[in-house]
Amino acid sequence: MTDHYVHTLANGIKILFKPSPSPITHCCFVFKAGSRDELPEQEGLAHFIEHLLFKETERRNTPQILNRLELVGADLNAYTTKEYTCIHASLLNQHLERTVDFFEDILFHSTFPQEEIEKERGVILDEIASYQDQPEEAIQDDFEELLFAGHPIGKNILGTPESVGAFTVADIRQFIQANNNTHQMVFAVYGNYDFKKLVKLCEKYFGNVPENTAQKHRVAPAAIKSSLHQIQKPITQTHCVLGGRAYPSAHPNKYGLLLLNNVLGGMGMSNRLNLEIREKYGIAYTIESNYTSLTDTGIFSIYFGTDAEKAGKALKLVHKELKKLRDNKLGTVQLKQAKEKFIGQIALAEENRMSMIISMAKSLLDFNRIDSLEDIFSKINSVTANELLEISNEIFDNDGMITLLFEPKA
């Protein structure tokens, strides 16, 4: 028996529903339009548009838009990634129609008045400036720019002061027409409703949205070689990111790398990097590893921040842990414990209902299917120690690693 339902409207928009007995609804509208879809002169445009969606529409002015859901106590937000734009809201069940009407209005009837463009331009320029004041944030973007040199995936989602300063209404409308394919949109709902009534509601509001079949031309990034980059900045600590390309979201080794990442520097305090570098040597307050899969590539990275005189030792210790994973298979007990820990963390993460429904919507967009928790756990449990060793030697290979250091100015 399925735990979710999917219906596709005539214009291609998919409706995803997961029933819940809760009086609270979590819903999201996710579509494939992100920073990697921008032309070279459009850096930051997808994020800029996401901000402007909360300004004027054909029916509402900015205060009416901002009050529309807040007046009934709903929580509304949005974000842009390299591959998606997502708008999401949490609300009492009785306010779903109000929310569907609101989503349809801002997504398909925004007018992008010039005065609002100018206001938001200033807001985002401030956001870019404040971001540069946070080295632990900025270094990740600079690392990705090196990892995907010359490719749209490597560009900062916020854009540059020059690109943001030049956006016009024509740029906005061109980007929307070129990227907002209705067959690459999902409206997902987690709540206590009758599915047939939900479909009728969505037909009423989204059914008349004009079909858009615009095709994207996403190009996979070319290969890279290892390199070391040291940048002097007016900071007090050394910040470091090292890593390389990783598996795309449909790759059979994805779950193996997710498991390895969790062992190495994932959630919690018992991962290898934290135990070795923070607990044993007291070198770094924050040390973590991350694996992000995209549709045609992926990013594996390790981040730490430490005192300048300790950075060299910290980097050596990180490489020592990577070498251990390349040289030695996980023992039977180690592998069993790693799987149990990771599966437990995934199960707990499901309690965040908004994250869960967004993840389901993205899965439907990318694969036209949604794996159950049991399917995911089965994939994790089927990973072998030999496979993890092969993955370690492929992904943690020094020849494909980029290392970026932000160092205090002497």
Image (tube, grey):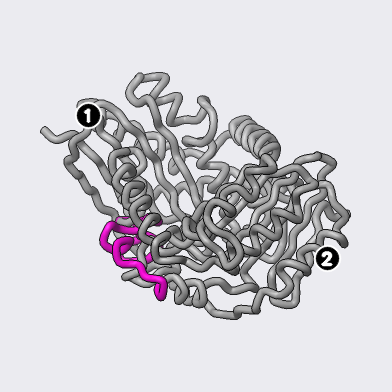
Q: Residues within 10 Å of mark 2 (few under 14, many from 20)?
A: few
Residue toward you, 304 or 73: 73
- SS at mark 1? loop
- SS at mark 2? helix
Identify whether 62 is placed above or below 405.
Answer: below
Q: Spatial distance from mark 2 to mark 1, Cα to Cα?
A: 58 Å
Left or right relative to 117: residue 26? right
* Quadrant of residue 30 within the rendered picture: bottom right
Residue toward you, 121 or 377: 121
* Quadrant of residue 280 within the rendered picture: top left
Left or right relative to 267: residue 128? left
Q: Is residue 366 visible?
A: no
> Which residue does the image show at 52% across and 55% down from the upper left?
62
Q: Residues within 10 Å of mark 1 (few under 14, many from 20)?
A: few
Label drawn at residue 236: 1
Q: Is residue 260 visible?
A: yes
Q: Which residues are magenta?
A: 146-171
Residue 167 among magenta residues: yes
* Quadrant of residue 267 within the rendered picture: top right
> x, y percentage for residue 211?
65, 79
Identify whether 249 is placed above or below 408.
Answer: below
Label drawn at residue 200: 2
The furthest residue to the left: 410
Label drawn at residue 331: none
Considering only order in the chain, which callout, 1 or 2, is on the residue closer to the N terminus?
2
Q: Amino acid at mark 1?
A: Thr
Q: Amino acid at mark 2?
A: Lys
> x, y percentage for residue 338?
60, 34
> x, y percentage for residue 386?
56, 47
> Which residue does the image show at 24% across and 32% down from the upper left?
312
